[in-house]
Amino acid sequence: LLFHSGVLVSLSLSGPQLEKVVIDRTLVGKLISDTISDAVLTDNFIILSFEDHKQLCFIQFTKKMDSPDVNKRLEKLSCLDFKISYIDILGPEGRRMKRHLAINCMQDMVICWWSATSDGAWPWSPISCERDRANLLLLGCAHGKLEVLSYVRTEWDPLDASFSTNQPYQVYTVEHSVSADKEPMADSCVYKCVRNKIQCAAVTRIPLRSKAISCCRDATEDKLVLGCEDSSIILYEAYNQVTLIAQAELLPALITYHPSGAIFMVGSSQGELQLFDTALSPVKIQLLAQDYSPEATLQFSKHFDVPSSLIQIQWAAPQVASASADGTDIHDRLLVRFDKGPLGVLHFKLGVITRGQLGLVEIIHQYIRYDEIHEAINVLNTMNWNMMGRQCYICLSAIVNHLLKQKLTPDREAQLEASLGTFYAPTRPLLDTTVLEYRDPISRYARRFFHHLLRYQRFEKAFLLAVDIGARDLFMDIHYLALDKGELALAEVAKKKANDIDAESITSRIELLGLSDKGDSSHEAFMDQRPSEHRGAHDPSAPGPAM
């Protein structure tokens, strides 16, 4: 935690319990201002911006914090030997404004940005040139110095700006915009940093019901969540260009995506929290208690006095994603920070079965446990078979196995179709390797669904499924059961379809044999064209040497 005055506080936790606090006042009195606006902290340097100064502070450590022991990293800055320097930046003169900072994962580029609406010309402080109208700066931090590389003015007022976690030289912004009809929109922009120049490369316009007040991207950066003034939540999926809308129970002033991408938390300034899954279904939560009574929101005011506004919620996870090899990283703690205090940590108790995980597989299994199959299928639909085939197959298997144990109803039938459809009719095309890996095991589930339909005499749907699978034995199953039930016309059609498949199979085998025979005859012709004296040596009918 960095206070406006320069006081740096490091907190060490053991689980949710506070273990150690280090208060470092090394920077107090050594800075040009005590109105720190934002900060970037790394193991090698610190960068500070100020609300009332057009300068950035660059604090370079001559001694690195390279100890793997986190507790040893909690040393005071005075032990690290540092030097302080300042760099002038662009922007309007004499204005007090919030200047935001963000750094890329390579830690060699930084952006500094501020609201475009705060730099309008004042009579006593006119804007002289386009350079002074810039509100997005690209800075390089290498070889122990910080320098302005490029600058640009965003087309609209930015709500947020940050570097991509996957592409270190791309910057994502979300900007307030309006349509031709003056309707509120959000522009999701991609800026590229090429040859030390920053320029806008792509813009996606997202229609909104009302003005956006918060936003967050998931770890894959494919999904963008926007919280709006009317309490609506907008989820935009870039790949499919699909927009989902839900209504929150609170004013979504804060949003943070869980590192797993399975859920995101929404918070209001009044100290309320609401949980959504990545398909935008609300997830009920409650504080740990003997009685099971989950609610739509968690309200801190019911449990302790909330003297000030909630201003930050953040999952306890590294800024740069570094998933473990077996995917068992546990992120079950949420930091909550109120303006002028208090500070707290929510520890999510997820049980032994989930091993403390809050991932997509665990969320789907929880939905199945409480028979919320529609929500489980919606989450499965958001998953990428090409990127997470194993997890997708685990989830599909769990859903289908659960449904096949239930009595078949129109709803269950539709859910089985939708579950299998996530593989057979996916939202994004499957790679050939993905199809080859999972085609056979999933076809076995399709056959089980077929026999489930037959068991409940859903002949029409079973027939259509048999056509999709294209197996002769399935049509013969329909034929015999239809005969037993007196459905003679259906029995005849099924028998004919089975015979057609049989005939096609025989024809295909004959064609393959024909191709094989042609290959053999051409080989023999080639052999016959060789000189006769050599033919005898290789002719099986030629007499062998006398014994």
Image: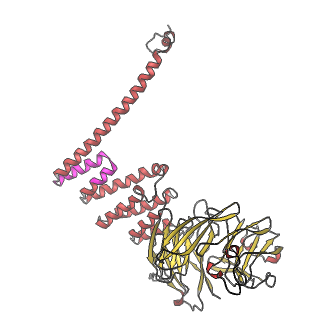
Q: Relative to residue 459, is residue 5 depicted above or below?
A: below
Q: How is the image coloured?
A: secondary structure
Number of numbered labels in the structure image = 0
Q: Nearer the viewer, residue 127 or 447?
A: 127
Q: What residue lies at 47% left-to-right and 49% top-to-bottom? A: 432
Q: Quadrant of the N terminus?
A: bottom right
Q: Main secondary structure of the magenta part?
A: helix
Q: Relative to residue 290, is residue 377 depicted above or below?
A: above
Q: Is residue 476 magenta?
A: yes
Image-based side of 488 in relation to 514, left or right: left
Image-based side of 33 in relation to 394, left or right: right
Q: Nearer the viewer, residue 83 or 452?
A: 83
The image quadrant of residue 78 is: bottom right
Q: Is residue 350 visible?
A: no
Q: Nearer the viewer, residue 148 or 301?
A: 148
Q: Position of residue 201 (x, y in %)?
A: 59, 63
Q: Position of residue 134 (x, y in %)?
A: 67, 74
The image quadrant of residue 91 is: bottom right
Per the rendered image, the range of residues in magenta is 463-486
Q: What residue lies at 79% left-to-right and 68% top-to-bottom? A: 145
Q: Relative to residue 230, is residue 307 depicted above or below?
A: below
Q: Position of residue 532 (x, y in %)?
A: 48, 10
Q: Nearer the viewer, residue 303 or 353?
A: 303
Q: Is residue 159 magenta?
A: no
Extreme top residue here? 546
The image quadrant of residue 149 is: bottom right
Q: Position of residue 103 (x, y in %)?
A: 68, 69
Q: Is residue 223 visible?
A: yes
